[in-house]
Amino acid sequence: MNKWLVFRSLLIGSLATLLIVASGCGSNEPVEIKIPQTYNNMKTLGAAYLISTQKHDKPPKQLSDLRPYVAAEIDLAQISKSENDGEDFVIVWGVDYRSSQNEKGTYPIVIYEKKGKEGFRFVCQFNDVLELDEAQFKAAYFPPGHVPTP
């Protein structure tokens, strides 16, 4: 699974770079690359989760614990909802990134979409956001004791 995630991330990054480079070749038209809002929202929440853990020397226990680490104009309730399935993200509270890696060095998924869209779900491993298909999701590493939604 990790090889596939690395390959997929590299592929997406390479394609984005190619689009940016190609946009300067023979055309003055800007190329628009749309990053899914769900990705951005998870990235914001994951970063706030990390910072909260660092600042308090313990992981957050609820959404309001992230408030000080998210820009004031951002509505936490709104960014905690998937644009893909309309459901609130599942956030696994109380997971400390400093001691939660598995034997392979993988961080657990702490934020994920309940259903996702078209067989894919966005997931967040603290600071990394990935899009997994259902087979990858079922095989993914979650915090001990957490049973992911089917």
Image: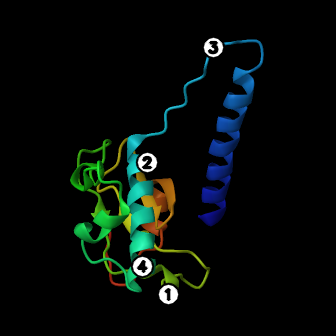
Q: Which residue is mark 3?
A: 29
Q: Residue at x 32, y 72 (%)?
A: 92
Q: Residue at x 60, y 58 (%)?
A: 5
Q: Position of residue 127 (x, y in %)?
A: 50, 64
Quarter holding the C terminus is bottom left
Tell me: residue 23, above or below residue 89.
Answer: above
The mark nearer the N terminus, 3 or 1, is 3
Estimate the spatial distance between the alpha carbons at disc 1 and disc 4, rounded to whole Å.
Answer: 16 Å
Q: Which residue is mark 4?
A: 55
Colour mode?
rainbow
Three-letter amino acid code at disc 2? Asn
The mark nearer the N terminus, 1 or 2, is 2
Q: Which residue is mark 2?
A: 40
Q: Position of residue 6 (x, y in %)?
A: 65, 58
Q: Position of residue 113 (x, y in %)?
A: 33, 55
Tell me: residue 85, above or below residue 16.
Answer: below
The mark nearer the N terminus, 4 or 3, is 3
Three-letter amino acid code at disc 3? Glu
